[in-house]
Structure formats: C-alpha cells, structure tokens
Image (cartoon, rainbow, N blue to C red):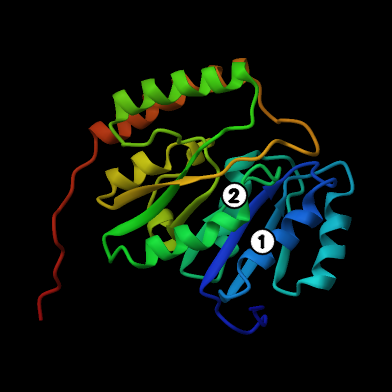
Amino acid sequence: METASSQIPALSVVAPMHNEAGGAGALVDEIAAALKDVDHEIIMVDDASTDETVETLKAARTRHPQLRILRHEKNAGQSRAVRTGILAARAPVIATLDGDGQNDPVDIPALYKKLMDGGDSLAMVAGERRGRQDSQAKKLASRAANAIRRRLLNDGSADTGCGLKLFKREAFLRLPYFDHIHRYLPALMVREGYEVAFSPVSHRARAHGVSKYTNFGRALVAVRDLMGVMWLNARARQPGRVEEEA
C-alpha cells in the first residue's frame, strides 16, 4: 500500500546508506514488497556517499513513490543518519534496518504486529539475528561484546547490534542522543521507563559493498560508550505515573 505525500503513514522505514549503490535499489524493492499491506513510507538517508547510491535511489523512487531520499552534506555516521531519518519521519512508528541488505525486510511485518499488540507500555521490539552470515571473528567479537554489555546494563538484549528494530517515534525522541546510540537503544528505552521486547529475525550475507566497521574500531568506542550509558542509567530517576490535576 503506497503512501501519498499528503498522508500520514502508519509506519516509516528508515535505513542509513553509505556507498551502497550495488544494493540500494533492490533493498527498496524488498521493503515495498514486504509492506504491501501496510501504509508506509521509506526514508533512505544517504550519508555523503561517493558512489552512485543517490542516483540508484532516485531510479527506485520512480517505482516506489513512497520513497523519500535524504542526503547528508558530510559523512556523519550510522547513528546520525538514522536520527536524521527519524526526525524527518511522519509516522508514529519507526522501523530501522541496515542499508547493506543483511537485514531481511520480510521480518518487518511480524515485528510491527508485535509492537502494535503490545500495549501502551511496549515501546520497542528489537530483532535478534539467527544464523548470522558474518565472519567467525566478527561473530565472536559481537558475542563477547553483547555478553559484557548485557551484564553491565541489564537490558535483556542478546544482540543489540542488529539494525532491525521497530519502535515508537515519540519514545525515541525522549532519549539522549549520542553517536552510536543505535547500539544502546534497548537499555535507553528501559531507562526511560518503557518496555522492550525481542524477536528472532533472519540475517543475510552482504552481497554488495564493504563493511563500514572493523572489530578493533568498534571496540575502541564501545568501552567509552558503555561507560557513558552506565552513567546515564545511574543518574536516572522515574516519577511513576504522571497526572494533570483538573
């Protein structure tokens, strides 16, 4: 179900892109097919690509008018690209997925239904990858990092690095923003008093482009970010139910 530009869609799908010309068009096609029964918009955020990513997306827009293309003047990273898309989104519910095609859009409807059926307190359904199609070194590094993070933050997430997440836009906008926030969304949602659920999703091998991260580079920022989120959690105080007096 395609969305006219004057309408407010039910779901906004946001994907960051950097030098993904080889798979950008196919990913848009897959998202549109997976959500044919959901009123949606697709927001692709090009993070200052140096290849033909934008041109490929413009070609895809001729097939899918619900596609919106945002472009960063300067490369700002995955978290900023995701936030750019969320700020521009018109729907009350956001779906994020990686722009490299490793997340399968066919999983989005099930996560969307789980979120919609979860009640007011459920703010996020986060995907957890099964059968990961990554190198053994990357899988081992990710497993170790997730175990440490889960123990220190107690967020219940076994795979916070999975890019496929469904959440309420209003809840996201309440969170403190920092670079690499996308790896700590479950913990930050819980900190804000929301419930978070998890759901298994599939994972595919990268067919185009190259990874934007290395294990060493990810580890360098992970320790600092983890300490920062631990500090945020330690400083959190919940007011309980808030009521307005008549």
Please state the total of marks drawn on the protein image.
Answer: 2
**109 above or below 65?**
above
Tell me whether circle 2 and circle 1 mark residues in contact (CB < 8 Å).
yes
Using the rendered view, name the quadrant where residue 208 is placed. Answer: top right
Using the rendered view, name the quadrant where residue 202 is placed. Answer: top right
- For the C terminus, which image quadrant? bottom left
The residue that appears at 52% across and 39% down in the rendered structure is 162
Q: For the residue labelled by badge 2, is the local secondary structure a helix, a strand or a loop?
A: loop
The residue that disc 2 covers is 97
Question: Is 102 positioned to the left or the right of 130 in the image?
Answer: right
On the question of residue 234 being in view, the answer is yes
- For the N terminus, which image quadrant? bottom right
Looking at the image, tell me whether mark 2 or mark 1 is earlier in sequence order: 1
Residue type, label 2: Leu
Q: Work out whether residue 146 or residue 226 is closer to the camera in this orientation and state it.
A: 146
* Image position, residue 109 (x, y; %): 51, 63
* Image position, residue 49 (x, y; %): 81, 43
Residue, far left: 245
Residue type, label 1: Ile
The residue that appears at 60% across and 45% down in the rendered structure is 80
The residue that appears at 64% across and 52% down in the rendered structure is 15
Using the rendered view, name the quadrant where residue 137 is placed. Answer: top right
Question: Is 59 positioned to the left or the right of 69 in the image?
Answer: right
**67 above or below 171?**
below
Q: Work out whether residue 99 or residue 227 is closer to the camera in this orientation and state it.
A: 99
The residue that disc 1 covers is 31
